[in-house]
Image (cartoon, helix red, strand yellow):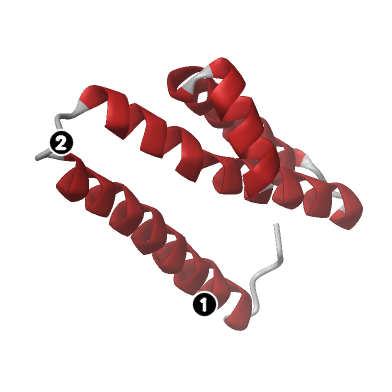
């Protein structure tokens, strides 16, 4: 995913890829929420994971183009921290729901 994402990001630019990634997240989220099929849920989860993988390269390009040399390290740290923080909280929250006996949907 990272190699393919890097190729797309280099060809299309960071902003274009980020907009595409946000679109993929919307499709993946709606699909996962609306489907009753475990197989389709898995496919939407894979689409979400692919979009997440592609995001980093696009975010790095956007930060590189939008901030000066002195600001870039701090901005990259924010992007990396926000990414991991949200994923970790989401995994804990939804894991707790499943552990409490709630249905996967």
Question: Circles 2 and 1: CB distance less than 8 Å?
Answer: no
Q: Is residue 53 above or below residue 61?
A: below
Q: Quadrant of residue 104?
A: bottom right
Give the side of residue 22 with respect to residue 65, left or right: right
Left or right of 23 on screen, residue 37: right
**At 29% across and 33% down in the image, what residue appears?**
63
- Helix or strand or loop: what does disc 2 sit on? loop
Question: Dot 1: what SS?
Answer: helix
Q: Residue furthest front?
A: 69
Q: Nearer the viewer, residue 42 or 52?
A: 52
Q: Which mark is residue 69?
A: 2
Nearer the observer, 48 or 10: 10
Q: Is residue 31 left or right of residue 11?
A: right
* Image quarter in which the C terminus is found: bottom right
Q: Earlier in the sequence, mark 2 or mark 1?
A: 2
Q: What residue sits 59% from the left and 48% below the top?
A: 53
Mark 2 crowd level (few <14, some 14–19, many ≥20, 10 Å Cα): few
Which of the numbered marks, if any, corresponds to residue 84? Answer: none
Q: Position of residue 37 (x, y in %)?
A: 88, 50
Q: Residue at x 51, y 68 (%)?
A: 91
- Residue 89 screen position, x and y as percent: 40, 66
Q: Nearer the viewer, residue 53 or 23?
A: 53
Q: In front: mark 2 or mark 1?
A: 2
Quarter-of-image position of residue 95:
bottom right
Q: CA distance from mark 2 to mark 1?
A: 42 Å
- Residue at 47% x, 73% y is 92
Where is mark 1, residue-wise?
Answer: 96
């Amino acid at each position: 995913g990272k190699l393919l994402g890097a190729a797309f990001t280099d060809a299309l630019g960071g902003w274009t890829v980020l907009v595409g990634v946000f679109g993929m997240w919307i499709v993946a989220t709606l699909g996962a929420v609306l489907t009753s099929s475990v197989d389709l849920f898995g496919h939407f989860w894979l689409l979400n994971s692919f979009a997440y993988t592609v995001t980093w390269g696009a975010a790095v390009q956007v930060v590189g183009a939008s901030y000066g040399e002195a600001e870039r390290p701090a901005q990259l740290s924010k992007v990396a921290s926000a990414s991991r923080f949200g994923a970790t909280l989401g995994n804990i929250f939804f894991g707790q729901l499943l552990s409490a006996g709630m249905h996967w949907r």
